């Protein structure tokens, strides 16, 4: 590996020497070799912030994503017993997705990305703080950057559109989520991880002056890697419904149906960390105070996630006693939360008015949604 990098750099120097000081075309060629350190591996690599000199927008997005914090995150430090467990490092601090542990000399075309167990990525041992860095997804075994477009750049560049548009790239590390995704994709769904987790943007790929003036806008993707943008893009990815509501003077009973209408993996998904999805069913009084409540939790570990297009039915029975007072409204909320329940991300919410007793299911009506 090391030698092939040295070789590439030597080649770059040769080309630079040959082509220097000539016409426009040669100037362009020369410009391709202006920054040999960018494709350097090991201590020589200046770090992802260097990519941010030119790719300003993309760098900012990545820096705000959890990928840039996958090593320095306190949760990771604690979970690895202060970085003691080396086998945890490879996905959190990858050399590059084009390099596997088993066979260090394979190039991108030879790696079978549909069988992650055969192509575990090698960890890197420098510049740890950058976590899943720019090189990690863009540097090929041939010491070039590759991406979805062709372009003229101050570093070696090779177009590989197919690879970058496919979920397999993400699946090298998101192994379990990718497996869930594959079983569903067999049913003919074609949205990729990128479609949902990297919002589409048309823009120039670099923003540094004056060079950006030479470049045109391209169809690209924001490097946010967040579930918030995925939720934003798929607003109604969860369908919540009250069904079979039955009421008498002593009881209100019924079902809440939850359907994963859009997401191509389970909800919640992920192998590591604490991910709880919580269903809250509340009965409220005339003043909007919760008088009865039921909760159900979904965890990957309990295997009770909502799989793609799956409909789950949760029933509830609220006994009404004298203290229950006037009951007026049913409410169901689905949210994602953390261990301390301090972070809450709303997935969906529905409300149902109940007419005053005696009430039957025909008297229950959906509350008009509030603006
Ligand atoms: C080299 C391994 C690797 C690759 C490739 C990778 N990821 Fe990740 N990803 C991680 C790690 C590690 C984390 C956890 C970071 C943390 O929370 O500390 C993560 C976190 C995430 C999260 C956020 C999860 C959360 O808890 O907020 C999303 C969303 C995500 N990745 C999407 C993607 C997408 C989309 C792709 C493909 C374009 C991708 N990832 C490719 C390793 C990778
Ligand atoms: C001195 C400026 C500069 C720096 C620094 C720089 N790049 Fe680039 N990069 C460019 C230009 C210019 C292009 C081509 C833009 C175009 O064609 O629109 C480019 C293109 C790319 C592409 C191709 C994207 C595609 O469209 O397929 C990738 C990937 C890339 N750079 C990665 C990196 C990484 C990773 C780093 C840091 C290690 C980096 N670049 C540092 C200027 C730079
Ligand atoms: C159709 C859109 C869609 C596709 C395709 C999709 N996701 Fe998601 N993803 C979402 C939504 C919406 C959420 C938020 C719900 C949740 O947390 O389960 C999410 C959540 C996640 C999370 C958990 C984030 C967190 O903060 O806990 C990870 C990790 C993730 N996706 C990775 C992936 C990967 C990897 C792929 C491709 C194999 C992928 N997603 C494909 C929409 C999508
Ligand atoms: C987790 C993997 C991952 C990481 C980390 C990552 N990229 Fe990308 N990058 C991608 C994918 C996937 C695409 C292709 C998106 C698409 O379909 O257009 C892409 C596209 C690009 C492009 C082409 C423009 C575009 O939006 O398509 C550039 C330039 C680029 N990345 C630079 C960077 C730089 C600079 C960094 C670090 C700050 C970085 N990338 C980090 C996965 C990654
Ligand atoms: C195969 C790649 C891979 C390996 C190996 C790996 N991780 Fe991760 N890790 C991920 C991905 C991808 C995520 C984000 C989504 C998820 O949970 O699947 C993540 C997320 C995490 C998180 C959650 C961070 C947060 O902010 O919520 C912790 C903690 C974590 N990993 C610890 C570990 C530990 C400890 C090990 C070793 C036992 C380990 N990881 C090994 C890929 C990996």
Image: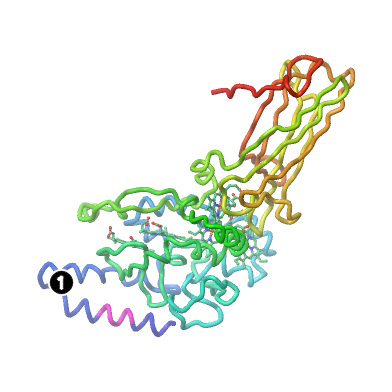
Q: Residue at x 57, y 62 (%)?
A: 182
User: Label 1's element?
Assistant: helix
Query: Is 353 a magenta residue?
Result: no
* Quarter holding residue 79: bottom right
Categorize mark 1 by other alpha carbons within 10 Å: few (<14), some (14-19), many (20+): some
Query: Which residue was labeled with disc 1?
Result: 26
Tell me, yes or no, whether the highlighted magenta stretch contains residue 10.
yes
The colouring scheme, among rainbow, by chain, secondary structure or one colour, is: rainbow
Q: Residue at x 64, y 72 (%)?
A: 87
Coordinates of residue 126 in the picture (x, y in percent) = 50, 70
Percent x, y for residue 240? Answer: 65, 36
Magenta span covers which residues?
8-13
From the viewer's perspective, is residue 29 above or below residue 227?
A: below
Tell me what residue is drawn at x 76 percent, y 54 percent.
302
Is residue 279 in view? yes
Q: Which residue is nearer to you in this view: 52 or 188?
A: 188
User: Please, is residue 149 above or below residue 362 in the view?
Assistant: below
């Amino acid at each position: 590996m090391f030698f092939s990098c040295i070789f590439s750099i030597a080649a770059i120097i040769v080309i630079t020497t040959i082509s220097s000081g000539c016409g426009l075309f040669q100037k362009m060629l020369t410009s391709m070799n202006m920054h040999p350190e960018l494709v350097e591996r090991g201590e020589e690599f200046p770090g992802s912030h260097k990519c941010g000199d030119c790719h300003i927008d993309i760098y900012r997005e990545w820096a705000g994503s959890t990928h840039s914090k996958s090593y320095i995150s306190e949760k990771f430090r604690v979970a690895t017993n202060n970085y003691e467990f080396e086998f945890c490092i490879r996905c959190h601090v990858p050399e590059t997705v084009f390099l596997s542990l088993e066979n260090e000399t394979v190039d991108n075309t030879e790696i079978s990305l549909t069988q992650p167990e055969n192509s575990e990525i090698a960890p890197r041992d420098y510049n740890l703080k950058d976590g899943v860095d720019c090189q990690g997804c863009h540097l090929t075994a041939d010491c070039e950057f590759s991406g979805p477009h062709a372009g003229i750049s101050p570093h070696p560049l090779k177009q590989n559109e197919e690879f970058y548009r496919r979920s397999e790239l993400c699946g090298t590390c998101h192994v379990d989520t990718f497996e869930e995704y594959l079983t569903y994709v067999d049913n003919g769904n074609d949205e990729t991880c990128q479609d949902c987790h990297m919002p589409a943007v048309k823009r120039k790929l670099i923003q540094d002056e004056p060079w950006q003036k030479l470049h045109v806008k391209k169809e690209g993707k924001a490097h946010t890697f967040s579930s918030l943008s995925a939720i934003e893009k798929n607003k109604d990815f969860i369908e919540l419904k009250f069904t079979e509501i039955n009421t008498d003077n002593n009881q209100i009973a019924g079902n809440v149906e939850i359907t994963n209408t859009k997401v191509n993996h389970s909800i919640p998904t992920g192998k590591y960390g604490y991910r709880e999805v919580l269903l809250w069913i509340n009965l409220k009084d005339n003043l909007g105070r919760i008088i009865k409540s039921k909760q159900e939790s979904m965890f990957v570990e309990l295997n009770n996630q909502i799989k793609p297009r799956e409909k789950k039915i949760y029933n509830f029975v609220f006994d009404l006693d004298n203290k229950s007072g006037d009951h007026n409204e049913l409410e169901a909320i689905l949210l994602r939360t953390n261990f301390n329940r301090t972070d809450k991300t709303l997935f969906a919410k529905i409300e149902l008015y109940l007419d005053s007793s005696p009430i039957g299911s025909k008297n229950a009506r959906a509350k008009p949604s509030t603006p």
